[in-house]
Amino acid sequence: MSRKQQLLKRHRRQKRIGLLIALMLLIAIGVLVAWWLPLILAVLGWIAHEAWFADHLFYSPKDDYEYSFPPYTQQPKVHLDGEHLRLDDGVMLVDDATLVLALRIKSTWLGRFLDPIVELSGGDSPDRQVFERGVNGLRYLNLSGQAQVLSKGELRLRGRFCRLLGEPVLWAFEHPDYSNRRVMVIAPHADDAELAAFGLYSSASESWIVTLTAGEIEAEHYQQMGLKGVEASRLKGSLRAWDSISVPLWGGVPQERCVQLGYFCLQLPAMQNAPAEAVLSREAQLDDTRYFRRFNPFALGSDVDGVPSWNNLLADLKELIERIQPQVIVLPHPRFDPHPDHLCSQQAVMQALGGTAWQPETLLHYANHLHDNDRWPMGDAGAGVAMPPQISAEEPLRPWSLCLSTEKQWHKAMSLGMMHDLQPRLPLKRLLRRAIQRCLAARQWPAFGENEFFRKAVRRHELFWVHELSGKRETN
């Protein structure tokens, strides 16, 4: 069982205990006061839960985030003078540097009911970064894109429903322009490349998209159209396979540089546990990856048998790495992103790299899911992406934040809108929750689409974690 599943199990157990206690109290009130009062209190309690307690937050908002950065990282001295964040005299920042600012944030009483916000202003790119309700601890803001304003001494920080405390600490990370490299994006499912790296792959001089699974499970939307289970699963997988090949064209990546490997959703862990064995689809009744590879621009070595095995997956990745010779590989983060297919995708790439003559210069890791906070990045679409929650610093991390223009964010939103898996309408329970939160918690959702990823992913930043390699090259 993954850590995410363990946290969810504990959360549900605690919720059941809480509901049992609440039920006993309501029964006691009905007996001792009035029979109708528990009904009113139950409705009010449900509304309060949906408004303020429905988030999956598996740590205390009073916990400090803990980050360790490489020891050679620049730390320009900054001071918070009222609302103005000022550098020491003579300090100038590189325009495209990734800037991370640590400071303590403490919510006001109203910040227990409305999301605490740190507003950045003073230039022509104002920003809002949101934190947990009831926050009272060390947090890390993303000031990337604000270097000029900060260098001029014009950057202002203002807390809404929170106060900014203590002396801030700034880190400045300088990186090469990865968009000038040959980039290969590893997507466990169709849409992962767009969620994590549309801005990067649509700007790179040469990008390749490699999608590992067809994403054919959980096809209830297609069953509602009258299809049977197997038919619905195969249709969904075929549509998502088509998405993985065709949607990147919107970002300038031609179809001949997009590959769908056609393995089966949520079956990568089983494949990894028995590398030589074929692992069938859970719902599509398929044992052949070639069913979902029919849109590929070229054949792979494993197309000879189409066996859905870990060994074939490794062979596919080795073949593609040698063929593409990527200078940068973009892939899920092994610790931040807990999805089992994402973890296995990262591990498969690392294992494949152990057997290839070609080695990339850089690995860029992303996180489309988190263990501890299902709302991260918190806040509205178009806002900045603060550092994700991390309660213990296990290793030094080096962030790279790519800034996206407003137009690039629009294009990213449209790429997500083309993805079939993000199109179905939300269930009634979630729509009711959003209506309640809009009225009572002042939360907003974008007009791009209903799926939560339109809020999470369409942001002014794309955040990656950098791992530099030696980049061994073959001689031509």
Image (tube, rainbow, N blue to C red):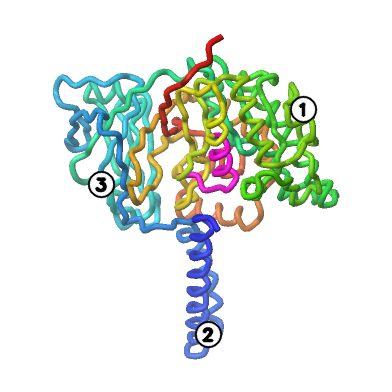
Tell me which amino acid carries mark 2: Ile
* Count of marks, rendered view: 3
Instruction: Please indicate, yes or no, whether residue 454 appears anywhere in the rendered image.
Output: no
Question: What's the mark number on residue 27?
Answer: 2
Evaluate if marks 3 and 2 touch, with contact meaning CB atoms under 8 Å apart: no
**What's the magenta bit mostly, secondary-structure-wise?**
helix
Question: What's the mark number on residue 104?
Answer: 3
Evaluate if marks 3 and 1 touch, with contact meaning CB atoms under 8 Å apart: no
Instruction: Please indicate, yes or no, whether residue 140 appears anywhere in the rendered image.
Output: yes
Q: Is residue 111 magenta?
A: no
> Residue at the spot x=69%, y=33% of the render?
261
Of marks 3 and 1, which one's residue comes earlier in the chain? Answer: 3
Q: Is residue 456 left or right of residue 59?
A: right
Seen as rendered, the residue at the extreme top is 476
Which contiguous range is marked in magenta?
336-349
Q: Is residue 82 left or right of residue 42?
A: left
Of marks 1 and 2, which one's residue comes earlier in the chain? Answer: 2
Q: Is residue 338 left or right of residue 470?
A: right
For disc 2, the neighbor class at 10 Å (few under 14, some 14 to 19, many from 20) is some
Tell me which amino acid carries mark 3: Arg
